[in-house]
Amino acid sequence: MKRQHTFIACVLIGIGLFYLLKQLNIDLLHGFYGWPTILMIIGIAFLINSIMNKDYSNIFTGTFLLGLGIHFHGLHHYTFWLEHWSVFTLLIGISLITRSIWTKNGFMSGLVFTVISGLLLFNNQLGEMYHWSAEVIDWVYRLWPVVFIILGIYLLKRK
């Protein structure tokens, strides 16, 4: 039997705890009193709802929102946090891999997103270590739309 109100219940509990802790003004949690925490709460609610109801369609959404909240929290609080557009494609890859754990579907897509995003994130460091990597990254950067088109056509044709 599916619990119909699990998601709303989790969001209400999370938001209630968030504002209660904010009112109590606990110094240890001071860095978490911001809007990225709300994203994390909603992401966790999606994950809990999906797992409790054994309806894994929202695993991707929950993981992505949780990752966005962590990313924006990291940008706001840590000087070493990476601020690069490929973080978002990395989150897509991680979300696809997480969903594939539950649904056994989409692992390779997630792996491709994660590997390409990792290469793009650390392109500057790789360029110092491997001279050829800059050429490969430049090639991938110019041809990624074609790769997406080919992958899309393949997925449409595949049975």
Image (cartoon, rainbow, N blue to C red):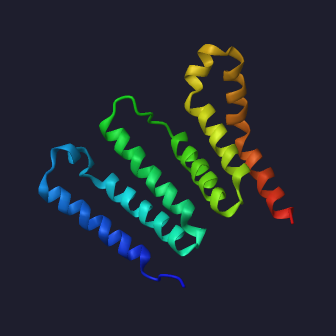
Q: Residue at x 42, y 44 (%)?
A: 71
Q: Residue at x 59, y 14 (%)?
A: 128
Which quadrant of the view contains residue 38? bottom left
Location of residue 140 with respect to 93 vertically, above or below: above
Pinpoint residue 16: horizontal percent, then vertical percent: 25, 67
For this rendering, which residue is in front, 14 or 1? 1
In the image: residue 155, left or right of residue 92 = right
Q: Residue at x 74, y 39 (%)?
A: 143
Pinpoint residue 159: horizontal percent, then vertical percent: 87, 66
For this rendering, which residue is in front, 76 or 21? 21
* Residue farthest to the left, as pictured: 24
* Circle count: 0
Location of residue 82 with respect to 9 vertically, above or below: above
Pinpoint residue 120: horizontal percent, then vertical percent: 60, 33
Which quadrant of the view contains residue 19? bottom left
Location of residue 135 with respect to 13 vertically, above or below: above
For this rendering, which residue is in front, 73 or 19? 19
Location of residue 142 with respect to 59 vertically, above or below: above
In the image: residue 58, left or right of residue 101 = left
In the image: residue 22, left or right of residue 129 = left
Q: Residue at x 59, y 26 (%)?
A: 123
What is the quadrant of the N terminus in the image? bottom right
Pinpoint residue 101: horizontal percent, then vertical percent: 64, 56
In the image: residue 85, left or right of residue 93 = left
